[in-house]
Amino acid sequence: MTYEDLPTVPRAEELVDKAFSRAARAGRAKSGAEAQRSMLQTAGNILSDNLQNVTTSWPDFDRVDPFYRELADAVVPAHGDCPGGVDGLRTHLSEVMWAGRQAGHIRDEYQSKLRGVDADLARKHRKQAFARLADVTREVSEDLEALGEARDTLKTLPDIRADQPTIVVAGYPNVGKSTFVNRVTNARNEVASYPFTTKQVRVGHVERDHVRYQLIDTPGLLDRPEAERNGIERQAVSALRHLADCILVFVDASAECGYPVEVQLALRDELADRFADIPVLTVCTKADRSRDLDADAYVSVTEEEGVEELLDAAVEAVDYEIELPFEG
């Protein structure tokens, strides 16, 4: 499951305008109390259906792949007094669902009032119903706005397949992760000489022996407790926790990245301890500037040094075997 299919979330005023303009057209086709009933039915249906459709278009976060759930927790911001992440989304969705149901109740309540009355009283009841329908819809305007912003953010997240073998590239900011991933895959991630250029988890693909491997370029990951990590860093940890079949820890032995080698190695050791059941390879990056490091691989992407060898080593560490159909 990804978030690519999330539809656009309408604003409250858009829904009110849509409902009432269509109701007016429906009313023109009839006369008397029947016209008022038709207008009410049309407006009530549009608001009730559209509001509830907003909520049903979102996934059940209890069933979302843990990787995507944690990404949503990391990237969806707080809105007003409502928290960010999945808890905030659930609150907004619950409010919008309530409004959709209320619109249906108002429609049904006033339809019963319109039965057997003359045109003037029917018009009075219909206007009261329209006022209440508009109030209910506008009551969740901030929730709709928050869901719309969250949808726009989530749709930018990468399409990552949990069933494909995955190589995760980790390390401190500005150690050359994106440069390597860009070089060996079809990814085109921004590369710059300042920390935290990679603002989101990115994915590229490479094929070896007819097997498609995902290479995940993670944001710069700092060696500090989970509770102190920001949203960008938590994305990187989520990718490591849920996706990695092999982790490449890039270490800049020249320390030109701005971080001492010892703290970079401390991060490597933390990852090796936390993911003891996953191959963790130490990669001396920018090897044309310094090789003063005990590493599993030495790479200089700018000098075309060790790139293919590192990729081969990662594929070997993954040790992925294609599942063949059972042959009796």
Image (cartoon, rainbow, N blue to C red):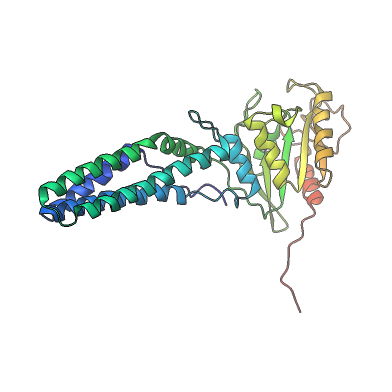
The vertical placement of 83 against 245, above or below, is above
Q: Looking at the image, how many numbered discs can be counted on the residues?
A: 0
Is 105 or 292 nearer to us in this picture?
Answer: 105
- In the image, is 22 to the left or to the right of 180? left
Q: Residue 196: tell me if it is visible.
A: yes
Give residue 216's quadrant in the image: top right
Is 209 or 218 nearer to us in this picture?
Answer: 218
Residue 180: x %, y % from top left: 70, 37
Residue 121: x %, y % from top left: 14, 47
- In the image, is 328 to the left or to the right of 186? right
Q: Residue 188: tell me if it is visible.
A: no
Is 48 or 165 nearer to us in this picture?
Answer: 48
Residue 201: x %, y % from top left: 63, 38
The vertical placement of 76 against 19, above or below, is above
Is 304 or 21 nearer to us in this picture?
Answer: 21
**Residue lying at 21% horizontally and 49% vertically, measured from the top left:** 23
Residue 82: x %, y % from top left: 51, 32
